[in-house]
Amino acid sequence: MNGHLIEWRDGRWIVPDDPVIPFIEGDGTGPDIWRAARRVFDAAVEKVSGGKRKVIWKEVLAGEKAYRETGEWLPESTLEEIQEHRIAIKGPLTTPVGTGIRSLNVALRQKLDLYACVRPVRYFRGVPSPMKEPHKLDVVIFRENIEDVYAGIEFRAGSEAAEKLRTFLESSFGAKIRPQSAIGIKPMSAFNSKRLVARAIRYAIERGRPSVTLVHKGNIMKFTEGAFRDWGYEVAREQFADRTVPESELASLPAGAGGRVVIKDRIADSMFQQVLLRPDEYSVIATPNLNGDYLSDACAAQVGGLGMAPGANMGDGYAVFEATHGTAPKYAGQDKVNPSSVILSGVMMFQELGWNDVAEAIIRGIEGAIADRTVTYDLARQMPGATEVPTSGFAEAIIKHLL
Ligand code: NAP
């Protein structure tokens, strides 16, 4: 069977029963976790559709395997395949030390304009957590993916460029910058901030989520982070006036939010306290790049760590789903590590494509395996009495509990 292409028409996915989806298995432990994940995906699709649907997986190369087979770390054909197929899923890749090697994520982000990094963080009952009530955290973080200090516009301390920029800023704007300073630029535009927040609001509306919180450091960085907050409220007013309500206007409404998504904002440092102390007051979070980087790992730690945290880089009509941890090279080829991060990335992928039945079956499978206490080493070492199983054994346990 050859399968058919997933299409994107009028802002919607058109998904055939036999979609072709490219995958990158990844380096280090990548092949182990990908093999396990693929078995779970295929079993779930087969089970819920009675064999009517089937994903046609298509391997594309990146990282060490690509280098071994083609002499390139990131062949152009991989980028083209992902562009043609619109959706892809990947395991972790080694970041080779050295210069001149393109990062797959950066290359894809630029080619496909993947402006949102989306990270859902929720608790699975039974997973060891440092929190007393970890189930209270259930957030989806939308992190701006292109701008902010991550834009990579930096000038080395003492370089000619840094000195030129410093003198220009001093002479033209009276900025005081110590000589020999390194300088980084933090660009943030209304265009990118607004489309990120719009995406987060649309997600909240479609999934029945109660609020979107804009997390910023606008009290200090008024024209960048502060503007992000203002643009966020603006886009809610301009595009979703009848579906949203600012938190500040809630008190004046007779029936509370009345099914509308509440738009809140929080200063970034206070938000780190909030997700620890009052996690159930937050649902969808939209934030600039650097805040989102820190916040998503901090939230993941609350519910059991990065081993259980999925993610995706998304644009309009393109999405690449990925495990959020690295290659854990010391366990490579040992059939040992936890495949949940890439499996949960698959759950996100099926949800995005509208195959919610498949996504729900997989979640039931993971919940069942954890409730049975048949888990990989990372969870077993923190769960007294648990049975440690290999990566492949965990996949089998998930499949056993699919329905
Ligand atoms: P790492 O691969 O994430 O591993 C760090 C530790 O996290 C492991 O030793 C292990 O802890 C735990 N861990 C990671 N994945 C796990 C899994 N699936 N199940 C259970 N435990 C898991 O981080 P790293 O060693 O710093 O990075 C290794 C390579 O990965 C580097 O080349 C890095 O650049 C790359 N990387 C790639 C990505 C990506 O492609 N998205 C992301 C991050 C890093 P214990 O030792 O406690 O068992």
Image: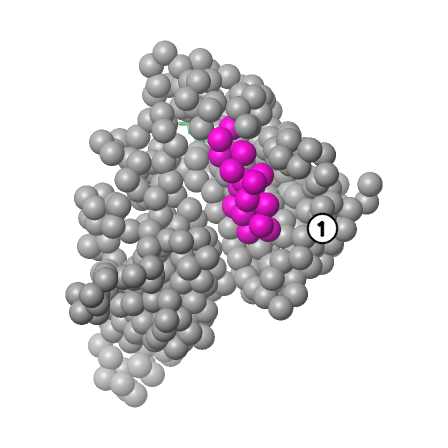
Q: Residue at x 34, y 44 (%)?
A: 138
Q: Is residue 248 left or right of residue 101?
A: left
Is 231 in front, or is 156? 231
Is 261 in front, or is 297? 261
User: Does residue 388 lie above or below 302 as drawn?
Assistant: above
Q: Residue furthest left?
A: 251
Q: Amino acid at mark 1?
A: Pro
The C terminus lies in quadrant: top right
Residue 362 inside the magenta-drawn segment: yes
Numbered disc total = 1
For the question of whether residue 321 can be seen, the reply is no
Residue 396 inside the magenta-drawn segment: no
* Residue 234 image position (x, y, % from top left): 34, 75
Region in magenta: 346-365
Q: Is residue 57 left or right of residue 392?
A: right
Q: Residue at x 29, y 51 (%)?
A: 282
* Residue 193 image position (x, y, % from top left): 40, 69
User: Does residue 77 lie above or below 302 as drawn?
Assistant: below
* Residue 339 image position (x, y, % from top left): 52, 31
* Residue 349 image position (x, y, % from top left): 56, 47
Q: Residue at x 25, y 58 (%)?
A: 268
Q: Residue at x 35, y 33 (%)?
A: 304
For the residue carrying disc 1, how many other residues have a C-alpha within 10 Å: few (<14), some (14-19), or many (20+)? Answer: some
The N terminus lies in quadrant: top right
Is 366 in front, or is 308? 366
Residue hosting label 1: 16
